[in-house]
Image (cartoon, rainbow, N blue to C red):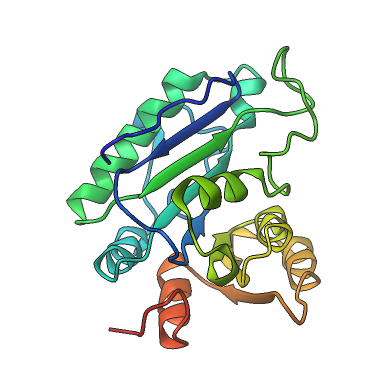
């Protein structure tokens, strides 16, 4: 991804945006762990990164259709001292390499390291960028001039879906194998007249569902 914006001035935030033009387009927002890669609990080493089956293909399909794909990831492992931004960057480089092999790429990456149980100065419990708050989505929407109202988010926790609802996206999809019954119930409870909630077994299936229904501004192809 050609960078035009890497690392916010804020020590607890990360943003990386490609130079492509996506004004007025709806985007696909994605959580990382449990959606694109295996959730190893505090992934901070490139050698531990494992892509989930079909994830690269799903992103490649969106890339071909001109749908911007934006990663939005909580990174409390940094606040807790389990790894640092250097480790995060190494994992992201490994992810980018794996996606390139599958002829896929991310169009932007946003991450938030703040957590209430973290070490100073990152020990902020309710930072605007930390999901379920919508700050990362809002920042991407503003900086990339996206059509947020027609965008969707895919995650493996109810907090991902809640962030999408708070950002006034069109809907959210919970990846079910990575979520227990309480997470599924909490996600479904967010469904409203102006916010759709779906359950899917994988990112690949989620993307196929959205495209089959003509969401994200593109027809299935």
How many numbered marks have been drawn onto this rendered protein structure? 0
Instruction: Assign the N terminus to one quadrant of the image.
Output: top left
- Examine the rendering and report whether any part of residue 31 can be seen: no
3 relative to 8 in the view: left or right: left
Residue 182, given in percent of the width and then of the height, sits at 79, 62
Instruction: Assign the C terminus to one quadrant of the image.
Output: bottom left
Q: Tell me if residue 112 comes above or below residue 216 in the rendering.
A: above
Between residue 169 and residue 48, name the one nearer to us: 169
Q: Residue at x 34, y 34 (%)?
A: 4
132 relative to 152 in the view: left or right: right
126 relative to 27 in the view: left or right: right
Q: Tell me if residue 128 comes above or below residue 122 in the rendering.
A: below
Q: Residue at x 65, y 55 (%)?
A: 160
Q: Residue at x 66, y 39 (%)?
A: 129
- Examine the rendering and report whether any part of residue 156 can be seen: yes
Q: Tell me if residue 23 comes above or below residue 140 in the rendering.
A: below
Report which quarter residue 220 is drawn in: bottom left
Residue 77, given in percent of the width and then of the height, sits at 61, 27
Between residue 218 and residue 94, name the one nearer to us: 218
83 relative to 194 in the view: left or right: left
Residue 137, given in percent of the width and then of the height, sits at 59, 50
């Amino acid at each position: 991804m050609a960078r035009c914006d890497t690392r916010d001035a804020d020590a607890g935030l990360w943003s990386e945006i490609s130079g492509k033009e996506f004004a007025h387009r709806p985007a696909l927002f994605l959580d990382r762990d449990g959606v694109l890669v295996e959730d190893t609990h505090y992934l901070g080493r490139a050698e531990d990164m494992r892509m989930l089956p079909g994830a690269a293909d799903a992103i490649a399909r969106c890339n071909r259709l001109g749908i911007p794909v934006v990663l939005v990831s909580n990174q409390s492992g940094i606040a807790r001292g389990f790894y640092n931004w250097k480790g995060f960057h190494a994992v992201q480089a490994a992810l980018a390499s794996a996606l390139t092999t599958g002829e896929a790429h991310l169009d932007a990456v946003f991450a938030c390291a703040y957590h209430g149980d973290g070490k100073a100065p990152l020990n902020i419990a309710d930072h605007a960028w930390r999901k379920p708050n919508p700050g990362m989505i809002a920042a991407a929407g503003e900086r990339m001039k996206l059509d947020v109202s027609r965008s969707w988010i895919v995650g493996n926790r109810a907090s991902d879906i809640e962030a999408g609802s708070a950002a006034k996206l069109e809907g959210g999809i919970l990846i079910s194998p990575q979520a227990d019954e309480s997470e599924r119930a909490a996600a479904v409870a967010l469904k409203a007249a102006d916010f759709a909630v779906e359950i899917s077994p994988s990112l690949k299936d989620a993307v196929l569902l959205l495209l089959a229904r003509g969401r994200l501004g593109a027809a299935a192809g």
